[in-house]
């Protein structure tokens, strides 16, 4: 049974589907998508030998070798011009942004990018904005006590969904998520606020508290309160 997180990622792939799943691990996502849609094609890319072998095995067990190519390689170097959509899920935002930046020459045929950062989605929103990918949709969900954000971007105007006056806040919290303010969004940021309050308390108790850091945290807490109230 595929996780709710990856099922939600799959929902944002557009038919006809030809996509690359970068950092595919067991290739669960491409197997699920290609099993459900016999006309789809996928490349499962993996940097490391262990997960690469797990992906190969999963594809073989599911008899999906005709639809899924498993490739060993770093980031976007595994894709070619058959690929119209790219998924990068389950890593930190800065790592995902770095994979996109390093491989951006390979994105010429890619019209849609779907990412699911575990932390720091802001790094990817910034990358989309500076590289002409329009952030068209966002989702947030809770699974097993974790909150996951999913960002969907199509080639186009990278600034389209932002407002110059609240750019920093939108990059941080997500322009669409901010508008929608779903229950999962509210819970995630209430949790984040409480964690930040605890960190400030600990910092203030230290002999040489970092005033600048405390100020930055306090500003973020104010933003969260503004948004949630
Ligand atoms: N995408 C799956 C998911 O969301 O469940 C697996 C996430 S797993 C935590 C991250 C995977 O990315 C690991 O299998 C790791 O080997 C792979 N990875 C890390 N950096 C990579 C890179 N630069 N290129 C390709 N794969 C990478």
Image: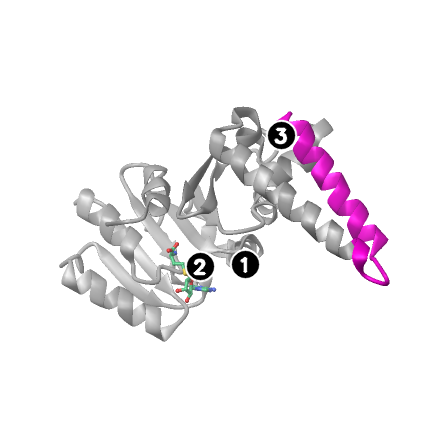
- The answer to whether 38 appears left or right of 177 in the picture is left
The picture quadrant for ligand 1 comes to bottom left
The x, y position of residue 169, in whole percent, is: 67, 35
Q: CA distance from mark 3 to mark 1?
A: 23 Å
In this figure, which residue is indicated by the disc labeled 2?
A: 76
215 is within the stretch colored magenta? yes
Left/right of residue 88 with respect to residue 17 in the rendered view: right
Secondary structure, mark 1, is helix
- Callout 3: few (<14), some (14-19), or many (20+) C-alpha neighbours within 10 Å? some
Q: Nearer the viewer, residue 182 or 195?
A: 195
Question: Which residue carries the number 3 mark?
Answer: 162
Q: Can the viewer see residue 111 in this picture? A: no
Q: Are marks 3 and 1 in contact (CB under 8 Å)?
A: no
Q: Earlier in the sequence, mark 3 or mark 1?
A: 1
Q: Which residues are magenta?
A: 204-229
- Is the CB of mark 1 within 8 Å of ligand 1? yes
Query: Predominant secondary structure in magenta?
Result: helix
Q: Earlier in the sequence, mark 1 or mark 2?
A: 2
Residue 61: image location, x then y, percent: 15, 63
Residue receiving disc 1: 95
Q: Position of residue 125 (x, y in %)?
A: 58, 42
- Nearer the N terminus, badge 2 or badge 3? 2
Towards the viewer: 14 or 223: 223
């Amino acid at each position: 049974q595929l996780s709710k997180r990856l099922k939600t990622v799959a929902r944002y792939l557009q038919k006809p589907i030809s996509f690359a799943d970068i950092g595919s691990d067991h290739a669960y996502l491409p197997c699920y998508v290609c099993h459900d849609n016999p006309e789809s094609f996928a490349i499962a890319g993996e940097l490391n030998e262990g997960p690469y072998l797990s992906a190969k095995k999963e594809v073989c067990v599911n008899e999906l070798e005709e639809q899924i190519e498993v490739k060993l390689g770093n980031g976007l170097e595994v894709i070619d011009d058959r690929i119209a959509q790219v998924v990068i899920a389950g890593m930190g935002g800065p790592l995902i942004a770095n994979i996109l930046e390093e491989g951006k020459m390979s994105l010429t045929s890619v019209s849609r990018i779907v990412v699911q950062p575990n932390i720091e989605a802001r790094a990817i929103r910034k990358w989309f904005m500076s590289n002409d990918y329009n952030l068209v949709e966002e989702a947030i969900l809770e699974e097993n006590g974790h909150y996951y954000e999913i960002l969907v971007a199509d080639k186009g105007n990278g600034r389209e969904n932002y407002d110059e006056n609240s750019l920093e806040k939108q990059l941080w919290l997500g322009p669409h998520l901010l508008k929608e303010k779903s229950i999962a969004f509210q819970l995630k940021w209430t949790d984040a606020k409480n964690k930040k309050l605890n960190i400030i308390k600990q910092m203030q108790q230290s002999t040489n508290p970092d005033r600048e850091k405390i100020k930055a945290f306090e500003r973020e807490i104010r933003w969260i309160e503004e948004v949630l109230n």
